[in-house]
Amino acid sequence: MIAAATRFEVRSAMPFPGTIAGMMPPPPSPSPIRFRRDEKRTEPSKPIVHLVGFDEEDSEALCDLLSRVGVAMAVHEDVEAFIRKAPSELPGCLVVHARLSPIGGLDFVVRFQRPESGLPIIVVADRPDVRMAVFAMKAGVIDFLETPFRDQEMLEAIGTALRIDRVQREAEARRLELRTRFAALTLRERQVMALVTQGLLNKQVAGDLGLSEITVKVHRGSVMRKMCARTLAELVRMADAIAERGEDPHLAAPSVSLRSWR
């Protein structure tokens, strides 16, 4: 049996020319937040396509399709089996057969769209109606396929879902690195960063904080070094990203236009 509620089974195959990664366009270029040369970079895990709620025949067909394009897959009897067994930290996506979901309607989709879940979802339904399709798309489903579907439709949907998951994980890694850099700043450095990214000159910052202009320059240089910012404009983008997520009250005020520094 392929599908088993008590087993997390991963199947993979060697890729060959024409895999999903080759068919899909590359992800958008990341924002210019750089890593230090001495920082360790870990190789990403191979993504896994989770097949949830399919019967044995359909599971076999999908596993054969994915193995031919070098994609790893895991088969789960139902949604609850996936919740119990699947490692949440691994990259990938879900392909869920809606008719076998033990959770009422498509409410399970909402559960997986929370930040702690995060995997993109593709829903497959035998006889979907408009209401089901609209609900699924509003809930954040990447694609909604009706059976019988063409192999190319499924591969394109999975390729899109895996690309979205990769982009989201890269963005989260950059946010984590930014938070780590910001946490290394002292309180005074955070205050200086907040004021200079709002367009204040060094002497204005010095007046606001009761410091000498020389001291402000020292703190400003330290901020640029710790945040790995080459220019003030780059530091402003970092401050905006931190303020949007409420990381620090000193950066709550929006940054002013770059024209203020010219």
Image (spheres, rainbow, N blue to C red):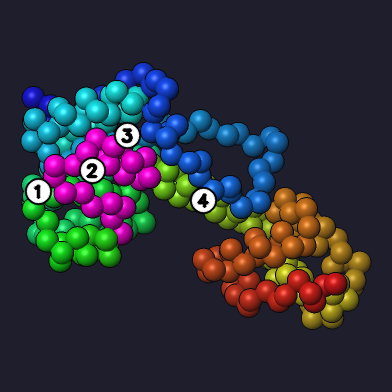
Vertical placement of residue 68 versus 124, above or below: above
- Which residue does the numbered mark 1 point to in the structure image? 126
Labelled disc at residue 171: 4
Q: Which amino acid, by three-letter code, is at mark 3?
A: Ile
Q: Which amino acid, by three-letter code, is at mark 1?
A: Asp
Q: Which amino acid, by three-letter code, is at mark 4?
A: Ala
Q: Nearer the viewer, mark 1 or mark 2?
A: 1
Find residue 231 and report its horizontal and vertical position in percent.
Answer: 78, 58
Q: Earlier in the sequence, mark 4 or mark 2?
A: 2
Q: Nearer the viewer, residue 185 or 37?
A: 37
Q: Is residue 27 left or right of residue 119?
A: right
Vertical placement of residue 233 versus 251, above or below: above
Mark 1 → mark 4, Cα distance in angstroms: 35 Å
- For image coordinates 63% across by 78% down, the residue present is 253
The magenta region covers 140-161
Mark 1 → mark 3, Cα distance in angstroms: 24 Å
Task: Evaluate if marks 1 and 2 touch, with contact meaning CB atoms under 8 Å apart.
Answer: no
- For image coordinates 68% across by 74% down, the residue present is 255
Q: Nearer the viewer, residue 156 or 103?
A: 156
**Element under disc 3:** strand
Q: Earlier in the sequence, mark 4 or mark 3?
A: 3
Q: Residues within 10 Å of mark 4 (few under 14, many from 20)?
A: some
Q: Nearer the viewer, mark 2 or mark 3?
A: 2
- Which residue does the numbered mark 3 point to in the structure image? 48
